[in-house]
Amino acid sequence: MTRRDHDEAHTDYAAQSAKLREPRRIILIIADSGTVSERLIHALEREIPWVVIEQVEHVAAACQVFPHPVSLILVGSRLLDGAEARSADLLRLHPQAQAAVIEPSDDNLPLSSANVSRSPLVRSLLPMNLRLDVWLSVVRLMLCGGEYLPPALILRSRQNGHSAGPLLNDGARAAHVASADSEMAGLTARELQILEMVSRGLQNKIIAAEIRLSENTVKIHLHNIITKLGAHNRTEAAARFRSLQERH
């Protein structure tokens, strides 16, 4: 064996060892068979090797203790009413889990948004028609405790001259200002809300406490905001937002 082969074998062994040491977490899918394709399941298992996928077709089957903690619950839209009826059980049995409704079509986004705004369980919408890399990034965000609302929903609401419903109330002021700027329009409602708070000089821990997120989740949102705006740091992103506020 050459030195290079030895080094590569050692690297592979180290990577496998680290994977085994990583605490396992479950993504629990409550949906009809085929709602999440085998291709996406395989991509999740390949790209996020520490997750275990559990799929059930009935809400009652989700109301049990699994071998590992559940970090994310994905609910098919057809089963959402049933999941909400058992929300107390699901939240008690899976207290660490974020929950999102699976939305296969952009046409149903406004209706799904209204459902989320009233739901005691779900806090996010997961479109199934995203590019694979984007879809995986959204899942990673939710696994870290973040929330996601499709930008298409916000843009459609602005084009129709309406707000996006109760789900956007927390960031309504920011959304109103950002609607006039093409770069800001690419931010989600939560990202706009956090950016507005950063522009007021609030620290991450204060933002996290005020909107009931972990400080780490706020940091992830800020990273996404900075990346989308092409800014160098949070200071530059906040300055752009303040400048936009002054013009409107």
Image (tube, grey):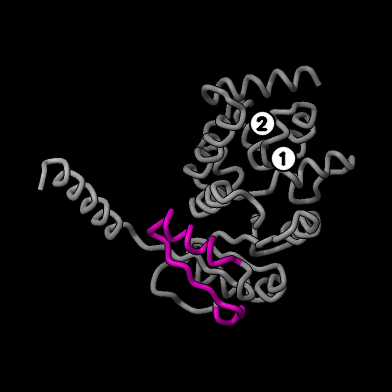
> For residue 196, which numbered disc appears in the image?
2
In the image: residue 65, left or right of residue 131: left
| Residue 189 quadrant | top right
**Residue 169: percent from the left, percent from the top?**
76, 45
Pointer 2 local density, CA inside 10 Å: few below 14, some 14–19, many at least 20: many
Chain part drawn in magenta: 36-61
Residue shown at 42%/61% (left/top)?
A: 51
Front residue of this view, candidates 27 and 119: 27
The residue identified by callout 1 is 171
Please report the residue visible at 54 percent of the width from the left and 53 percent of the height from the top: 139
Quadrant of res 244: top right
- Residue 9 is labelled as none
- In three-dimensional space, the C-alpha distance between marks 1 and 2, rounded to whole angstroms, equals 8 Å
What residue is rendered at 67% in x and 54% in y? 129
Looking at the rendered structure, the secondary structure element under dot 1 is helix
Q: Is residue 135 above or below residue 23?
A: above
Tell me what residue is drawn at x 16 percent, y 41 percent.
4
Image check: 87 left or right of 136?
right
Cβ–Cβ under 8 Å for marks 1 and 2: yes
Lower position in the chain sequence, tag 1 or tag 2: 1
Residue type (three-letter) at the residue carrying disc 1: Gly
Crowding around mark 1 (Cα neighbors within 10 Å: few <14, some 14 to 19, many 20+) is some
- 22 in the magenta segment: no
Q: Is residue 41 magenta?
A: yes
> 63 or 158: nearer the eye?
158
